[in-house]
Image (spheres, rainbow, N blue to C red):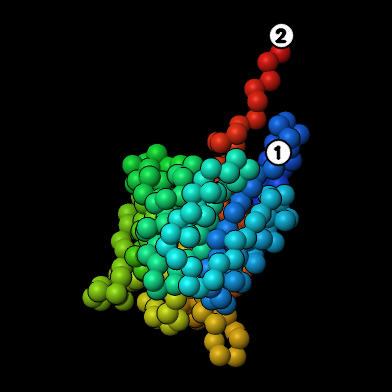
Amino acid sequence: MAAQRINGTEIAQSIRDEAKTQIQSRLANQGTRPGLDVILIGDNPASKSYVGHKERACLEVGINSTVHRLKNDVTKQELLNLIDQLNQQEHTHGILLQLPLPEHLQPQDFLEKISPEKDVDGFHPYNMGKLILREPGLRPCTPLGIMTLLKRLPLNITGLHAVIIGASNIVGRPMAMELLLAKCTVTVCHRFTSSLAAHVKQADILISATGKPNIIQSDWIKPGAIVIDVGFSKLSNGTIIGDIDFETAKLRAGWITPVPGGVGPMTVATLMHNTVQAANTQSPCPTIIND
Ligand code: GUN
């Protein structure tokens, strides 16, 4: 039987609707909207497109968003100064530095300068550490979005074997921590993993985040597995594809995310959720005292 398609577009809409409702009640109770500042450096087309999606989502849910577009040759000091200014700005509740950065800039030099309570990407060492220690604060958007998808399935994932392909700071590593928190057994594969096929064949939950189409063969997929494809590659004819061939994988999987329309919209919706969380932590609604 063909796998059931996990509709990320639809679930992301429900997360944005939730954020919108929370923003409306914040506005009614204390009169301010959450504010998100995004820093976009250079003219990487994929980054420009992601930032466009984020701006549109902010507009939809009622977050005040500002995009700071910086030239590719921005200096380390100029970027640090901007982060410093945004850290101090009261109406900025969330700061997002769009990655990747140009080669002369090292992400870690900047990510750790963003105030942890404004770190809506969850990439600051403090927030990563909190996640590792099972006390999550602001959590990386793609892994948290995937957890939301998994929680919407009519399945208990406790004890399942999750195999993650890709060990990046953005997806693979925090994903492993989220799945551990959800009581899964976790394997992380990366470029030096030998016998990738053997690991994939054991996966009850397979999460691929390599950006390399066809790195996983569909006949490796365990029958009935939950398959989450984080890959997002553009072919020369403009078609967007994931790491996994959807048409053949769906013949073996139990559940599968499409690309596009799977994980991508969840990342953006989770950013809206995180921005509301950050705003409510920094300036909570006043307690109503009835006396
Ligand atoms: N580039 C690709 N994915 C992401 C993400 O989740 N956050 C940021 N800041 N940059 C990215």
Identify the residue at image location x=42%, y=55%.
111
- Residue 290: x percent and y percent? 71, 13
The label on residue 32 is 1
Quadrant (top left/top right/bottom left/bottom right) for the N terminus: bottom right
Callout 1, which amino acid? Thr
Dot 2 falls on a residue whose secondary structure is loop
Q: Is residue 130 left or right of residue 97?
A: left
- Compared with 155, 51 (above or below) is below
Q: Which residue appears at 71% of the width and 32% of the height?
A: 30
- Depth check: give the residue in front, 224 or 11: 11
> Judging from the image, what secondary structure is the residue with disc 1 in?
loop
Q: Is the residue marked by circle 2 packed among few (<14), some (14-19), or many (20+) residues within 10 Å?
A: few
- Of tags 2 and 1, the one toward the viewer is 1
Answer yes or no: do the residues labelled 2 and 1 have beta carbons within 8 Å?
no
At a point 58% along the width and 58% down the height, the residue shown is 38
Compared with 228, 291 (above or below) is above
Taking 149 as reference, is 21 above or below it? above
Count the marks.
2
The correct choice, above or below, for 5 with respect to 245 in the image is above
Can see residue 180?
yes
Q: Where is residue 198 drawn, in percent x and y?
A: 28, 73
Q: Amino acid at mark 2?
A: Asp
Q: CA distance from mark 2 to mark 1?
A: 25 Å
Left/right of residue 13 with respect to residue 40 in the rendered view: right
Ligand 1 under 8 Å from disc 1 Cβ: no
Q: Which mark is residue 279?
A: none
Please tell me the numbered disc located at residue 291. 2
Q: What x and y, as percent, mark residue 158? A: 40, 49
Q: Is residue 7 visible?
A: no
Dot 1 surroundings within 10 Å: few (below 14), some, or many (20 or more)?
some
* Left or right position of 127 against 282: left
